[in-house]
Image (cartoon, helix red, strand yellow):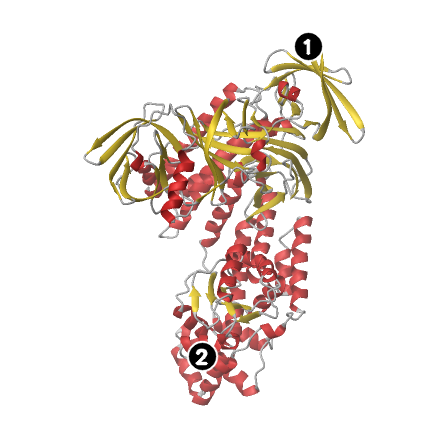
């Protein structure tokens, strides 16, 4: 039956081939030859028919074929001077060796009548949208299935040999027209079709209801002001940042009368084409202007000397981008990403696309900031000022980008500028030489690269002499601090802890003392540069904390409960240690006589009992010393905004690391260095949040497990078995994390949706906290709502934590493990909470076993 199915597939495959196809390839080679690939979905085989061969998602005509004792060699027509050949050795019993000349070696392949990963459609299964008309506007060609079940493509009618769906990823069509053959790959986009074939990738949109729209479809730029003022598309127009549906489009002599209707009000525009790319538009006020249909904006006729808005970080204002993505490659939300300089991390804001490709995204900004627009799909660099509102347009087919609204001229300058890329044409050997260069050689290379970038910018400015001051300033500062960022990244390769003097002198004099960008949030690479630069300056001074100092402070402040004898023993031992460090042997011996074995035993017992609190206290003291050291560096910064920003950022760094409030006296001392009212208010809110958080109990307190009864455990396997024993019969998702671990905490907001997806199922979320102070540990559990009926939190003693981490070779955080219902480790590389679908699927699979 299997052979019969293959035979029937072959009959279906070839029954539509025209008689004049001039077969060249022998029948025993026809079919699909597949081989194993490393990743499912990669190109995994070649399709061969009577005169065409598929290679890497393209169908190539066979020009000639030679058979040499059972080894077939085909010469394929690439349409250019490149050579493409295919050799097939010993085809026999469904096996053969294939080698394209672009491959390094031949590959063993298996024959089948058609690609087994393609589900062939019958005529009734082909998606209905292929029978509606789609048009590619630049080429004015159509794509659709006709009433005769033929495909109209490239302005020709093609026979559909077969159509099918490949792994739910795309549809594929094998088309034939006389002796021509095409493999066509189609992705359904939000409101378009992405069609790929030998002619390249093209985007097809639904055909307009009124064909007159194609006489003016596109973005029209005012020839006098160089502004994008009108966007005309199949069903609507864009004008003054608003979307206007068409009421009617009518011929009016040699002109077109375009009537727009919005909120019950009409707007009339007369359109008179002078040629394909120049037209005169007259609006209802009688204003008449000449407009150009172009991809790029022309040079400005006058100079724009406007400076960037700088509010000196006094408040947050919301900027708004509304926009239209035409023919987007996915329906993912439109994103705006930038560096939050206070948190020193990338943040993203999103606007969902509607069915037409429209979106709105609101971005809270503290000052003018470099942003990345829609980075995943087709990222571009822009600069946004607080409070501004503009309309963004991008056509993924024509690559046209335009804006209208606030600062539109400047935005259009940036959107249409191609940045200098020093590594795009660099050979691998040159790239490796740069990467492996010593520091002074790397400095020289970086200077040359910056010079080339500056020359590249100057050539652009010669072409656009009236480029705005903002454009010139932003791009030049960007190139400068790209060099600065690269240079300071080298601090992570330092062996002696310090840069060579010429290296750091150049950084000081040419980058840092040359004043930061205004405002300093303007250039993303400056944020990275200043983070590394000031961290380097602060790292030149090392800090240490004595455990005895911490213990003594705990005793005097009565932070631990000691008897009179315990207190006397501890203080005596601390004094002995202090005298011993001064090498005053006479005083040391005198004190030692009065320090009996009983006192030593008592003092050592106190250290053991309060070891964890001593470690936490030492950690906090180190954090305060680091804060003091960084404040000392920050006070030397002449630029007030930058100085205030770095101090405020240091507060955020402390709270992010500790997740607990500062002692009031320490907080007041540090806050005395911060003057900016906005920053002070934000920091005080954080301090109050953690103070209040510490007063509230963890919800589901029973999820915080005590392990005092296991304190003497010496074997990691038996200890771990005891910890998971109560949950046998359930799937356990284990998370090794720490309060100090930023990636660990970055995953925690994703836990709640995973728990919701697995609600009511036999699954336990088990956490092991590494080196985590108790207060911060509890606060994080509260902050991210990590306690629940099916959550278990362990903060084991250091020895036991190390035992388990060693047993499971935990050397990076976070690490996630899945344990099956029998208590066996299923995988040491379980999906992260942010990979919700994969994690839920993995848990559900274990639940069914």
Callout in the foreground (1, 2): 1
* x 41%, y 62%: residue: 811
Apparent side of residue 273 relative to residue 484 in the rendered image (left or right): right
Query: Is residue 516 in view?
Result: no
**Residue 777: percent from the left, percent from the top?**
56, 67
**Marks 1 and 2, the one that precedes in the sequence:** 1
**Kind of element beneath mark 2:** helix
Residue 558 image position (x, y, % from top left): 60, 77
| Quarter occupied by residue 586 | bottom left
Identify the disc placed on residue 14.
none
Mark 1–mark 2 Cα distance, whole angstroms, equals 104 Å
Q: Residue at x 34, y 47 (%)?
A: 36
Q: Is residue 619 left or right of residue 663?
A: left
Q: Dot 1, how many residues are within 10 Å of its Cα: few (below 14), some (14-19), or many (20+)? A: few
Q: Quadrant of residue 398?
A: top right
Q: Is residue 146 above or below residue 839?
A: above
Where disc 1 sits, the SS reads loop
- Answer whether residue 829 is visible to the viewer in this image: yes
Residue carrying label 2 = 576
Q: For mark 1, what is the residue?
A: 254
Please tell me which residue is depicted at 42% across the width and 29% down the height of the picture: 182
């Amino acid at each position: 039956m299997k052979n019969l199915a293959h035979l029937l597939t072959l009959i279906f495959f070839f029954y539509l081939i025209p008689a004049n196809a001039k077969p060249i390839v022998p029948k025993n080679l026809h079919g699909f030859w597949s081989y194993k690939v490393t990743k499912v979905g990669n190109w995994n085989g070649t399709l061969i028919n009577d005169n065409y061969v598929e290679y890497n998602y393209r169908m190539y005509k066979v020009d000639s074929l030679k058979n040499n004792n059972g080894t077939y060699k085909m010469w394929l027509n690439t349409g250019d001077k490149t050579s493409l050949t295919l050799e097939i050795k010993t085809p026999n019993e469904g096996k053969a060796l294939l080698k394209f000349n672009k491959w390094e070696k031949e590959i063993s392949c298996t024959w089948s009548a058609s690609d087994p990963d393609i589900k062939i459609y019958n005529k009734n299964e082909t998606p209905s949208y292929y029978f509606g008309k789609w048009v590619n506007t630049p080429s004015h060609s159509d794509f659709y299935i006709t009433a005769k079940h033929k495909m109209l493509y490239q302005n020709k009618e093609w026979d559909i040999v077969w159509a099918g769906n490949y792994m739910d990823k795309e549809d594929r069509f094998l088309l034939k027209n006389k002796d021509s053959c095409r493999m066509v790959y189609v992705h359904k986009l939000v409101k378009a079709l992405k069609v790929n074939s030998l002619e390249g990738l093209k985007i097809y949109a639904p055909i307009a209801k009124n064909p007159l729209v194609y006489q003016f479809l596109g973005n029209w730029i005012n020839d006098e002001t160089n502004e994008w003022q009108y966007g005309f598309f199949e069903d609507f127009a864009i004008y003054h940042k608003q979307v206007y549906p068409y009421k009617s489009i009518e011929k009016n002599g040699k002109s077109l009368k375009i009537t727009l209707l919005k909120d019950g009000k009409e707007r009339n525009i007369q359109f008179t084409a002078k040629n394909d790319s120049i037209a005169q538009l007259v609006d209802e006020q009688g204003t008449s202007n000449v407009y150009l249909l172009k991809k790029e904006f022309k040079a400005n006729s006058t100079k724009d000397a406007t400076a960037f808005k700088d509010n000196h970080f006094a408040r947050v204002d919301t900027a708004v981008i509304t926009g239209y993505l035409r023919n987007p490659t996915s329906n993912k939300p439109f994103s705006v990403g930038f560096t939050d300089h206070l948190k020193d991390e990338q943040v993203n804001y999103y606007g969902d696309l509607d069915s037409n490709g429209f979106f709105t995204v609101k971005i809270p900004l503290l000052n003018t900031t470099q942003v990345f627009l829609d980075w995943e799909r087709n990222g571009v660099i822009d600069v946004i000022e607080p409070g501004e509102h503009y309309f963004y347009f991008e056509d993924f087919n024509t690559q046209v980008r335009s804006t209208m609204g606030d600062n539109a001229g400047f935005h259009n300058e940036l959107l249409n500028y191609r940045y200098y890329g020093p590594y795009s044409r660099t050979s691998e050997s040159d790239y490796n030489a740069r990467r492996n260069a010593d520091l002074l050689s790397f400095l020289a290379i970086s200077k040359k690269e910056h010079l080339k970038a500056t020359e590249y910018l100057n050539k652009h400015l010669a072409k656009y002499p009236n480029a705005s001051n903002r454009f010139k300033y932003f791009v030049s500062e960007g190139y400068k601090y790209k060099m600065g960022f690269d240079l300071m990244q080298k601090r992570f390769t330092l062996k002696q802890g310090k840069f060579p003097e010429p290296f750091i002198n150049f950084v000081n004099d040419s980058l840092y003392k040359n004043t930061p960008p205004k405002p300093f949030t303007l250039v993303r690479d400056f944020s990275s540069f200043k983070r590394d630069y000031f961290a380097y300056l602060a790292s030149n001074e090392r800090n240490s904390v004595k455990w005895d100092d911490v213990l003594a402070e705990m005793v005097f402040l009565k932070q631990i409960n000691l008897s009179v004898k315990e207190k006397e023993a501890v203080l005596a031992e601390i004094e002995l240690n202090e005298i011993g460090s001064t090498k005053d042997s006479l005083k040391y011996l005198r004190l030692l006589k009065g320090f009996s074995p009983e006192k030593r035993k008592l003092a050592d017992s106190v250290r053991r009992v309060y070891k964890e609190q001593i470690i936490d206290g030492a950690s906090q003291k180190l954090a305060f010393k680091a804060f003091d050291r960084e404040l000392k560096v920050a006070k030397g910064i002449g630029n007030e905004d930058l100085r205030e920003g770095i101090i405020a950022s240091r507060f955020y760094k402390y709270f992010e690391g500790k997740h607990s409030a500062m002692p009031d006296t320490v907080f007041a001392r540090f806050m005395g260095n911060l003057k900016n009212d906005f920053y002070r208010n934000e920091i005080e809110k954080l301090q109050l949040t953690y103070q209040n958080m510490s007063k509230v109990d963890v919800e589901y307190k029973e999820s915080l497990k005590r392990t005092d009864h296991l304190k003497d455990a010496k074997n990691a396997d038996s200890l771990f078995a005891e910890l998971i024993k109560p949950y046998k019969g359930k799937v356990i998702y284990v998370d090794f994390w720490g309060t100090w671990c930023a990636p660990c905490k970055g995953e925690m907001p994703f836990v709640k949706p995973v728990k919701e997806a697995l609600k009511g199922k036999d699954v336990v979320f088990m956490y092991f906290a590494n080196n985590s102070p108790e207060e911060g540990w509890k606060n994080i559990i509260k902050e991210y709502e990590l306690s629940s009926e099916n959550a278990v939190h362990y903060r084991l003693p250091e020895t036991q934590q190390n035992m388990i981490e060693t047993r499971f070779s935990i050397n990076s955080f976070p690490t996630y493990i899945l344990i099956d219902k029998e208590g066996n480790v299923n995988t040491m590389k379980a999906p992260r909470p942010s990979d919700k679908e994969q994690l839920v699927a993995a848990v559900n699979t274990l639940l069914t076993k």
